[in-house]
Amino acid sequence: MKSCMVGSRKLKHKIFIVDDHPIMRQGLAQLINQETDFTVCGDAGDIREALKAIAKHQPDIAIVDISLGHISGIRLIEELSDHYPDLSILVLSMHDEFIYAERCLKAGAKGYIMKHEPPEEVISALKKILSGEIYVSDRLSSRLLHKLVHRKSEVYSSPVESLSNRELEVFQLIGRGMKTRKIAEQLNLSVKTVETYIDHIKKKMHFDDSRNMFLHAVKWLMKENIK
């Protein structure tokens, strides 16, 4: 990791935090600002606010949660990767890394860390990303390597892993009790497109009817939210 100097003063790497919980943003900022080579240059609670503020502050790293209200943070990762290719993104999430981490890395993130990890691990992840490396847990690293070696016979530990990013987003909103038309409005899609995603979900997860899909979505979402 290169050190930038202005005269005899060392420039700190700028970190931007995106999380829909103000207490989480404040806690992260306090943790990061204790470091001599990091400074939090701003924070945001939703995608629109984040895109506007990141354009203004031009951070080195954005820490992004993938649960931003009813909208998936993966969409933010994709947008940031498209508009700011030099911006590194670290995902900090409560959600199962086996389901979300690879999606986030494919979307453009440089690391994925669970919120239950100790605070010092967040700092380690930031430093690793700034040095040009990818950060994932040892557990996930082993799984990804195994998947690479055995790519011809991909096996999912959960049926949810087989869903595309958009299908997963629809599945989550179904679990929150949203009807098809409301999901379409939320995701800015046509009702027909959402119905197509729902058909894909049913086929991939082997649901016979919409009721079973809804019950499974509710149970899965409850399980995810208490991790």
Image: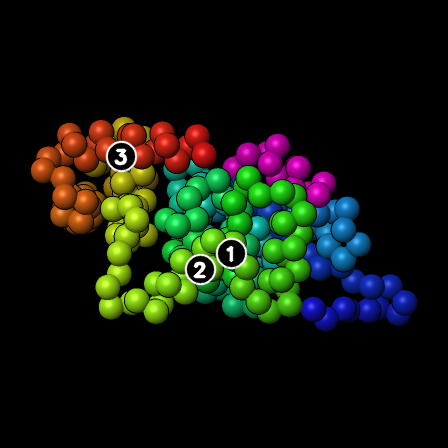
Task: Tell me which residue sits at (45%, 34%) in the image.
Answer: 227
Sequence-first tag of 1 and 3: 1
The kind of residue tagged 2 is Ser
**Residue 42 at x, y percent in the picture:** 65, 47
The percent position of residue 145, horizontal first and vertical second, equals 41, 65
Say which residue appears at 25% left-offset and 46% top-offset. 159
The secondary structure making up most of the magenta span is helix
- Mark 1–mark 3 Cα distance, whole angstroms, equals 29 Å
Q: Is residue 41 left or right of residue 167?
A: right
In this view, 169 is above or below 106: above
- Give percent across and percent down for residue 15: 65, 53
Q: Which residue is mark 2?
A: 142
Element class at badge 3: helix
Q: Crowdedness of circle 2 by 10 Å Cα count: few (<14), some, many (20+)?
A: few
Camera-side mark, 1 or 3: 1
Q: Is residue 119 visible?
A: yes
The residue tagged 3 is 217
Quadrant containing the N terminus in the rendered view? bottom right
Q: Residues within 10 Å of mark 1 (few under 14, many from 20)?
A: few
In the depicted view, which residue is nearer to us: 57 or 4? 4
What is the magenta range? 20-31
Relative height, residue 24 to residue 99 (above, below): above
Q: Secondary structure at mark 2?
A: helix
Q: Which mark is residue 138?
A: 1
Q: Is residue 5 left or right of residue 143?
A: right
